[in-house]
Image (cartoon, rainbow, N blue to C red):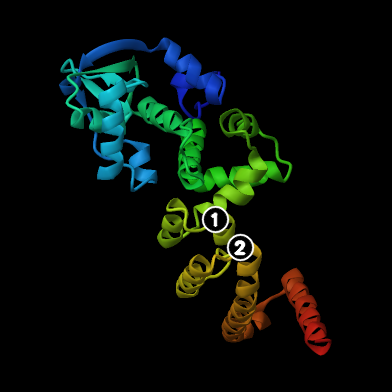
Amino acid sequence: MTQTKARGLPHVSGLATGLAALTELTDKAVHRLVDIQQVHVNPDFNPRGRFDPDAFNEDRLAALSSSIRAEGILSPLWVRARPDGGYALIAGERRWRAAQLADLKKVPVLVFEADDRRAAYLAVLENAQREDLSIVDETFAGFALLSAHTGLTVPEVIGRLNQVRKGAEDTLELEAFLRGTYGTGVSVWSQHRARILEFTPEELSAIQERRIDVSVVYELVPLKAREERSVLLQRAVQDGLNATQTRELVRPLLARQTVSGLKAEVSELRSTLPRLARLKGDAAERARQLIRELQNLIEHE
């Protein structure tokens, strides 16, 4: 009997997606009140710290600490047991840091049975459900979640999303997964959210800081020159430009970019043309057809 390798996370396979998965997972966790010193953070594990560079800003932590001091921790930290009797944090690092600032001695936790891979999945899933996610946070978290869910790399996920959008069979149930988790489907994530991964750090910061709308930055993506993008971004921020106004500024730059790119391709082709004479049979006939097409294109310019 031939065995097939399961994709994604075997520990959570078969679960419903999104909120349903979150509910099922937390129902299986054990609720405890533990000493805060027993909870340990793995460096760079928290997805929020990776997607939101301002997540652990001192002012934001101070505000959260003040709230925790007044009302306690309303949402338990997600942890898993460690061999030494302590707990490794899965999700909730901001609450854990703020609780320390508030001098809390004990914190509520949900204890999960999880290996490294499942813990990573849980961390991204927990962050994906937060109500205060910006579109940038949500996008980076969403692709990390899709990668964990499918076992594919992010570029492979994007490729599969595009295939499904064009009519390929959705064997990984990506549409259902995205609808259940975010309320949007394959089309949005393949055509719009994937473009956010192409934003420059400067553009991402402008969106995170609410100095510009994401729709404006979408218009900058086709430009290859980072300097041009940076200049236009600054102008869009300063002048409060919308997407339509930005598109009008980008259009002539794109036209120049196309001409410049064509010149480079012509130059490269010129150096390889002598090799056409070596072609034989069907390849030679195809080359003749292409030459005739090029001649016709040039004559009717």
Give above or below for 71 relative to 288: above
Q: How many discs appear?
A: 2
Identify the residue under disc 1.
213
Q: Position of residue 121 (x, y in %)?
A: 42, 29
Residue at x 44%, y 20% (from the top left corner): 11
Give above or below for 52 relative to 84: below
Identify the residue under disc 2.
242
| Quadrant in the picture for residue 217 | bottom right
Q: Position of residue 175 (x, y in %)?
A: 64, 34
Residue 260 or residue 210, whichever sits in front: 210
Mark 2: few/some/many CA within 10 Å (<14, 14-19, 20+): some
Side (left or right) of 57 relative to 301: left
| Quadrant in the picture for residue 288 | bottom right
Element at badge 1?
loop
Instruction: Name which residue type carries label 1.
Output: Asp
Query: Which residue of the protein is positioned furthest toward the front in this rendering?
Result: 70
Q: Position of residue 53 (x, y in %)?
A: 34, 48
Q: Is residue 2 visible?
A: no
